[in-house]
Image (tube, rainbow, N blue to C red):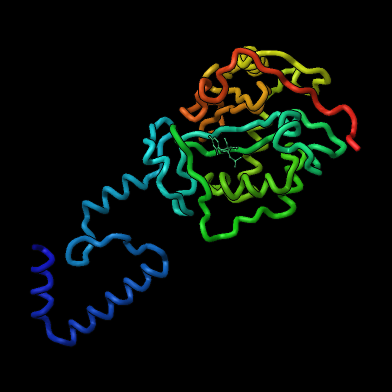
Amino acid sequence: MRTNAILRALRQLPPKVQLGLGAVAVVVFGIMWLTGNLPQNLGENGFVNERQNAQRRIEGAPRQAAQPSSKRAAQRPTSGSNSGDYDYLSLALSWSPTYCETSGRGRESRQCSGNRAYAFVVHGLWPQYEKGWPENCARGRNPRVPNDVVRTMLDIMPSRGLINHEYKKHGTCSGLDAKGYFSLTRDLYRKIRIPPRYVRPTQIIRTSPREIENEFLKANPGMKPDMISIVCGRGERLKELRICFSRNGDLARCGRNEDQKKLCSRGSIRVPPVRTRRRS
Ligand code: U2P
C-alpha cells in the first residue's frame, strides 16, 4: 500500500526530477551490489520489507556462548559470511599410537615413521554449535595456510596435510585467519596438562574412560567432568580426547557433540604405547 502511494507520488514529479531520482537509485544499488550489502530477498513490489530485515538481523547476529542451536541451525549451509558463528570450541587431541596402528598404518609419514614418537597430538580446534558444527566456511576461496605457519605447528600437529585440512574445514569457521587460528590452537593446547603416564608411555596402559577423565581432572584444576570426553576407536583403543573451551578461551562445558556415551561407552580401553624405535 505504502509502496503504491510512493510510486504514484513519484509519477507526478516532472520528468527531469524522475530521471535524476532514477540515476541516484541506480548508483546507490550499484554501490550496495559492489560492497555485497544488497539485500538477498526483496519484499513485495521489489522493496525491502523492514520486518523481514529485522528478523534477518536477529538470525544473523553472533550467537551467545550458551545459546542452544537446533539441528537445523547446525545443518544450515556455511559460508564466509557466518565464519565466527559458533557456541564453543572443542580441542581434539588424538592419541598418535592408535592412529599409527589403525588409519595411519603403513603410511610413510613423519607422524608414524619419523624419528619422533608422538603421544597426544592436536587433531584440530573445532568451532562447535551446541549440537552440530559449521564447516568449510570459506567456500570458493582457497584457504591456504602459509608455510611459516605450518612450520610453527608441526611439533604438535605432525602433518602438513592435517594442518591444511583442519584450517580449511574448521579454522575458516573460527573467524580467524590461519595465523590467528593456529596461535589460538597452541594457546589452548598449552592450557592443558597431560597426566604424567600419558606423556610417553612405553608399555600398554589398560584403563577406562572414567579413569582417564579423572586423571585429567586431577592434572587440570578447573576442569570439570562435563568439559572433557574420551573417544575410543577400533579394538577398544583410546582414539582421542575432546576438551572444550568457551569463546573466550576458558575451559567450558562441552555441547552435545561430546556426549560421552556416544563417543565411548566402553567400560575398559587400552592405550597403546609410543613407538620406541624407528621402524625400518
Ligand atoms: O568423527 C569423525 C570426523 O568428523 C569430524 N568431526 C567430528 C566431531 C565433531 O564434533 N566435529 C567434527 O568435525 C572430524 O573430522 P576431521 O576434522 O578429522 O575432518 C572427525 O575426525
Residue 220 on image: x %, y %: 64, 18
241 above or below 138? above
Q: Residue furthest bottom?
A: 16
Residue 144 location, quadrant: bottom right
User: Is 270 left, or right, of 60 in this rendering?
Assistant: right
For the point 48% across and 54% down, the residue is: 80
In the image, 82 versus 75, the foreground residue is 75
Q: Position of residue 49 (x, y in %)?
A: 21, 57
- Quarter placement of the N terminus: bottom left
Answer yes or no: is residue 215 visible: yes
- All told, the count of numbered labels is 0
Residue at image x 21%, y 67%? Answer: 46
x and y, in percent, of residue 81 in the image: 45, 53
**Where does ligand 1 appear, by image quarter?**
top right
Residue nearer the viewer, 136 or 174: 136
Instruction: Tell me if residue 217 can be seen.
Output: no
Relative to the observer, which residue lies in front, 51 or 93? 93
Image side of residue 269 versus residue 6, left or right: right
Q: Residue at x 38, y 32 (%)?
A: 68
**Is 55 rendered above or below residue 2?**
above
Instruction: Residue 180: give x, y in percent of width and height.
Output: 62, 46
149 versus 253 height, above or below: below
Q: Quadrant of the C terminus?
A: top right
